[in-house]
Image: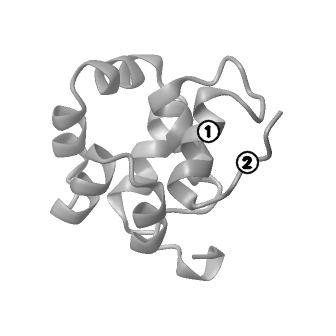
Amino acid sequence: MGIQNVDKTLPSNQMVFDLRRDADKYHLFQQDIERVMQDYGLTQEERMAWRGMDISRLAELGVHPYFLPQISRLFKGGGYNHNDSDAARLYAEKMGISQKES
C-alpha cells in the first residue's frame, strides 16, 4: 500500500483532491455522499469502502497515500489536527495502527 500502488485513474483520488479544495463540493459530500460518489463515477468497490470509511481498503484500491489521512478529515473534520483528534483516531483505527494511551 505504498506510492507504487497508486492508481492515477481511480476516481476516488480526484474526488479527495477536489473535496479538500472546493468548499461547495465538500458541503455536498457532507450532505449527500451518494450523489458525490455518483458524480465522480466511483466503482462499487470504492463506494463500499467510502460508506464504511474503510481507509485501508481505499489504499488497496489505489488511493494515493497522501490522501488517506485526508479521508479521515473529510469525515471527522480537520480543525483539530492532533494525534488524539477524531480524524486521527479514525485513521489509526482503519489503518490498524495502535495509539498510545495519553
- Disc 2 element: loop
Relative to 15, say whether 75 is above or below.
Answer: above
| Nearer to me, 9 or 48 | 48
Which of the image's four quarters has the N terminus? bottom right
The residue labelled by disc 2 is: 99
The image's colouring method is one colour
- Residue drawn at (78%, 29%) of the image: 82
Q: Is residue 78 left or right of residue 56?
A: right
The disc label shown at residue 61, or none: none
Q: Amino acid at mark 2?
A: Gln
Q: Amino acid at mark 1?
A: Arg
- Residue drawn at (38%, 68%) of the image: 9
- Residue drawn at (19%, 41%) of the image: 39
Q: Residues within 10 Å of mark 2 (few under 14, many from 20)?
A: few
Relative to 66, say whether 26 is above or below.
Answer: above
Q: Are marks 2 and 1 in contact (CB under 8 Å)?
A: yes
The residue labelled by disc 1 is: 89
Relative to 13, say whether 28 is above or below.
Answer: above
